[in-house]
Amino acid sequence: MTTEVKNGKNRAQRPTFRDLVKLTGYSQGAISRAFNGQPGIGEATREKILKAAREIGYYPNPAARNFKRGYTSRIGIVLPNLGNTNYSELYEQLDLVNAKGGYSSILAITHDSETVEADTLLHWSAGETDGLIINPIVSGKNVDLYRKLKSWGFPIVLLYRLFGSEFDGVYIDYKACLRQALIYLQDVGHRKVAYVGFSNLRKPVGKLWLLLELLKELEMEFDETGSVFDIAGDEAGIRAFSQWNLQGRRPTAVVTYSDQTAISLYSDAVSMGLEIPRDISIFGSDDVAGAKAVGLSTIRVDRSLMARVIVDILHARMRDFDAPTRIQTLPCELVLRRSMGPVPKSKK
Amino acid sequence: MTTEVKNGKNRAQRPTFRDLVKLTGYSQGAISRAFNGQPGIGEATREKILKAAREIGYYPNPAARNFKRGYTSRIGIVLPNLGNTNYSELYEQLDLVNAKGGYSSILAITHDSETVEADTLLHWSAGETDGLIINPIVSGKNVDLYRKLKSWGFPIVLLYRLFGSEFDGVYIDYKACLRQALIYLQDVGHRKVAYVGFSNLRKPVGKLWLLLELLKELEMEFDETGSVFDIAGDEAGIRAFSQWNLQGRRPTAVVTYSDQTAISLYSDAVSMGLEIPRDISIFGSDDVAGAKAVGLSTIRVDRSLMARVIVDILHARMRDFDAPTRIQTLPCELVLRRSMGPVPKSKK
DNA sequence: TTGTAAGCGTTATCAG
DNA sequence: CTGATAACGCTTACAA
């Protein structure tokens, strides 16, 4: 039933176009046209070729196609990790939208390493992908590289961190929601707010700096000794509580870098016998799937919309490299759940 | 068909090896050897070439390399989704292990569609990847295709579902842990256990069938009307509770397909004012990061070990296609947390 | 140590 | 409508 092509070792080899040429008697050109739905070939011939191909299991070699065509129909997505559910959910959305547009997605996880990021960008922009969606590493050390890619006409879109207005990008308006959250905390009696997560006090970027700005604006205090910096991930809770236990005090309200951080905090709080929000108020970010389960107050972004916007910007850039730079800010929504409440009585 | 990157005349083009030839005066061969760390080139020449390359930003075109070399140093990973944190965590581990071995990873999300899976396998095995790690779709409709890939000498490793012993694969010994969990439930007074998740009563595969077997063995009852089938994901809770509310009763203990399912259940239980485990006992699977936060009892698998084993099997297959089939069963561990407890008093 | 040239599997351009 | 044929950018024998 199936015609198999054998090699010297008498194992069936994957068939190539040569086998199809031999089998059908048509030329390479005809076969190529048949597979690409191009004009210049009769419907009957195409059918015959495709049928024969199906029989021997022929599929045009993608590596050869990519090479010859000069494009890959592949979009590279560069993220720091997948442990933060925000990223895995975003990737899934991006993959979905890309697939709809006839593109496949390829993911690189940088683990926040600037060299990994740089290698990936250089490699992927050189002929692995047609465009890149990048959540740039915090340090901003690769900005020159982004600039270089841009100068070569290679389409990139930056996420969350924009580095000025020179690159296409998508940004979330966290500030508005964070302000609402802080006002709520203020209303229920909190004066001081700590931060747990990525970022430190040296670089004026990211959520921490948003928080500092807003606290000043609202005339609230920043709980610096209660804050834990440069941490993001599932160890956040352990790190934070060991610091607080050492200090003999813990903050009454904590704003975190991400839901992952917040959930980790929540989880260790519970296992230490604390009650949320009675003993401590926690605020997350991104409304990850698990946030609802623990009743985490957080910031919600429509990730499906976000993915569509990102891909739309990327496609616009691929279509016309000289279009003006597009930076889009997406709205977000405050999600109030059980994890925030009045200041602990004893601490007031 | 695909949008092409527009190449204006007045924009810097990405440099190719021709530019290097012109710039350095060396031949293509020399340049290739310089970039591949091969012998047959002087150290001085190599330095000169690499320096020049760095200056003009040259990077060997990966598409051309892949094509010419006949391999890609890329491993394809085919998973149903990333919404289930188990998969995103597994992917991250696999990516890590692959990277260590000099391979990059590429992810396809099938959304449990057999055609998406089939297309991906055909495409990727034809020259996008050197090997595939597949969590096969439940229906098993593509087994013939796996067989075909195998007959072509293309390395694949199957996860979780093995379809006999014909393919390399990695399997988790869920049964042992599930038995312990059921014994625990029995001890605290449960007689009937329901199932919520993927799978249905027709096909004798997966967790549900493990559960049925074990219930018989332990002389416990299966709560069929309390079970909810063919669901997995964040809507599980809503679906389950709407069914239970309609029926006017709900099960006292539920075994779920995954932590994602369990957490969804948990989350909706809480928002309906129920208390866990007072009103209902829930058992998950895979000990996802968020499981700890809600105190979910579950089954833990060492995902880092799992990734290493998978990649090891794949590499063995890539090295020697005629090695005997390897199927490895990984142990798992019961994680008892707060989500399981005695039968509700009123229901006893 | 270096240069030269064949060829990988396609697509695209040209004649027929 | 069809079939040769020339690239595409690289790797790798082989020649110098």
Image (cartoon, coloured by chain):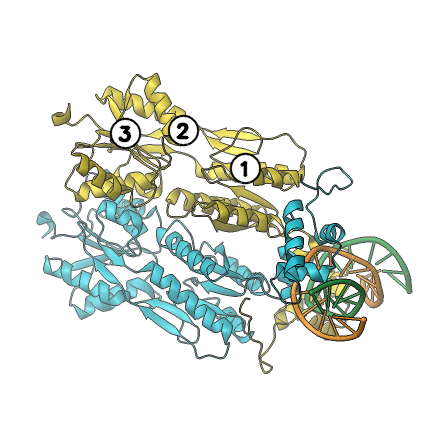
Chain colours: A cyan, B yellow, C orange, D green
Is residue B67 visible to us here?
A: yes
Q: Which residue is mark 2?
A: B174
Q: Which residue is mark 3?
A: B194
Above or below — where is A120 with respect to B231? below
Residue kind at label 1, given as amino acid type? Val
For the point 76% across and 38% down, which residue is it?
A9
Label 3: how many Cα within 10 Å (few below 14, some 14–19, many 20+) = many
Q: Secondary structure at mark 2?
A: helix
Above or below — where is A159 with respect to A91? below
- x, y (%) of residue B325? 60, 30
For the point 34% across and 18% down, which residue is it?
B216
Are both tags, 2 and 3, on one chain? yes
Task: Decide if residue A72 is on the left or right side of residue A342.
Answer: right
Q: Which mark is residue B143?
A: 1
Residue kind at label 3, given as amino acid type? Ala
In the rendered image, which quarter is residue B19 located in? bottom right
Mark 3 belongs to chain = B
Residue kind at label 2, given as amino acid type? Tyr
Q: Secondary structure at mark 1?
A: helix
Q: Nearer the viewer, mark 1 or mark 2?
A: 1
For the point 8% across and 49% down, which residue is it?
A345
Return the residue nearer the eye: A241 or B142: B142
Are both tags, 1 and 2, on one chain? yes
Is residue A147 visible to us here?
A: no
Return the residue nearer the eye: B288 or B27: B288
Return the residue nearer the eye: B218 or A118: B218
Mark 1 belongs to chain = B
Tell me the CA gap for discs 1 and 3: 31 Å
Task: Decide if residue B302 is on the left or right side of residue A19.
Answer: left
Are both tags, 1 and 3, on one chain? yes
Q: Secondary structure at mark 3?
A: strand
